[in-house]
Amino acid sequence: MRIDKMLANLGFGSRKEVKKLLKDGAVKVNDQPVKDAKLHVNPKDDTVTLNGEVIEYKEFIYLMMNKPPGVISATEDSYDQTVVDLLEFEDSVYSPFPVGRLDKDTEGLLLITNDGQLSHRLLSPKKHVPKTYFAVIDQEVSEGDISAFKKGVTLDDGYVTKPADLKIIKSGIRSDIELTITEGKFHQVKRMFEAVGKKVIYLKRLTMGPLSLDESLELGEYRELTDEEIQQLIEYEAN
C-alpha cells in the first residue's frame, strides 16, 4: 500500500496534506524518514510513525456498542445523533457503519464495522441470524402468546413472521420476557406484540448470532471485539 494512501485512509489529511507531512519529514518507516508519497509499505511488517507516534493500520475494525436510547443506527443524520457520532476519532477514521438497525428508543448490542462483506452476509434474509431481545411488556404475557409466536403471528401489513422463541421471565401487570427472532422486519418485536394486543415499553438487544452483549459496557460505551469474537463471527457468516 502506498504510504500516502495509508495515511489518508487513516484520516491524517487529504493526499495533498499527507504529501506535506512527508515533505516536512514528519513520517518515518522503520525509523527512516520518508518523503516519497509513492513508497509502498506493508502495514503488517513495517513500523510507520508520524511525529514519533506509531501509526496502527487495520483493514477492518469490529466494534461492539451498547447502544443508548435516543441515538439512531446510522452513519449520519441531519437531526439526530448517530452511533457513529459516539466513536472516538481513531475508530471513526475507518469509516465504520452499524450492521443492521436498532430503533431509536431501543438499547443494547450493536455491531459496528467497515467489513461490508461480513455485514451483508449477516443481514442476508437467507442467513436467518438469531437475535435475542429483552423486553418489558405493558401487561401479562401468557402461554398462549408463546404458542402464537412459535407458530408465527400476522403483522399489521399481513406478513406472517417466522417462528419465534418467547420466554416469560416475570409475568404480571407488566411482564419481562426474552424473545429470539431470526429475521429483522421494521419494528418487528414491537409489531409482533401489537399483533397479540400488547405493547412493548422497553426493548434491549442481548445477542446477535454468536455475539452477546458485554454487560460491563455502559450505555453509549463500546469496545473492539476480541480475536475470539471476530473468529466466531467470521466462522458463523461463512457457514
Image: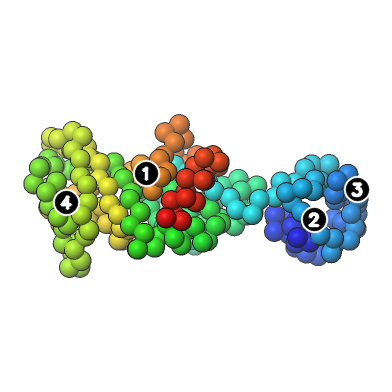
Marks 4 and 1, how far apart in space? 19 Å
For mark 2, give the secondary structure: loop
In the image, farthest residue toward the front:
239
Judging by the rendered image, the residue that carries numbered circle 1 is 207
**Residue 49 position within the rendered picture, expressed as x and y whole percent measured from the top left:** 81, 46
**Lower position in the chain sequence, tag 3 or tag 1:** 3
Judging by the rendered image, the residue that carries numbered circle 4 is 150
Question: Foreground residue, 65 or 38?
Answer: 38
In the image, farthest residue toward the bottom:
158
For mark 3, give the secondary structure: strand
**Lower position in the chain sequence, tag 4 or tag 1:** 4
Q: Amino acid at mark 2?
A: Val
Marks 2 and 3, how far apart in space? 12 Å
- Report which quarter residue 13 is drawn in: bottom right
Give neighbour class at mark 4: few <14, some 14-19, many 20+ (Cα, 10 Å).
some
Give neighbour class at mark 2: few <14, some 14-19, many 20+ (Cα, 10 Å).
some
Judging by the rendered image, the residue that carries numbered circle 3 is 32
Above-or-below relation of 95 to 90: below
**Lower position in the chain sequence, tag 2 or tag 3:** 3
In the image, farthest residue toward the left:
144
**Lower position in the chain sequence, tag 2 or tag 4:** 2
For mark 4, give the secondary structure: helix
Q: Amino acid at mark 3?
A: Gln
Judging by the rendered image, the residue that carries numbered circle 2 is 41
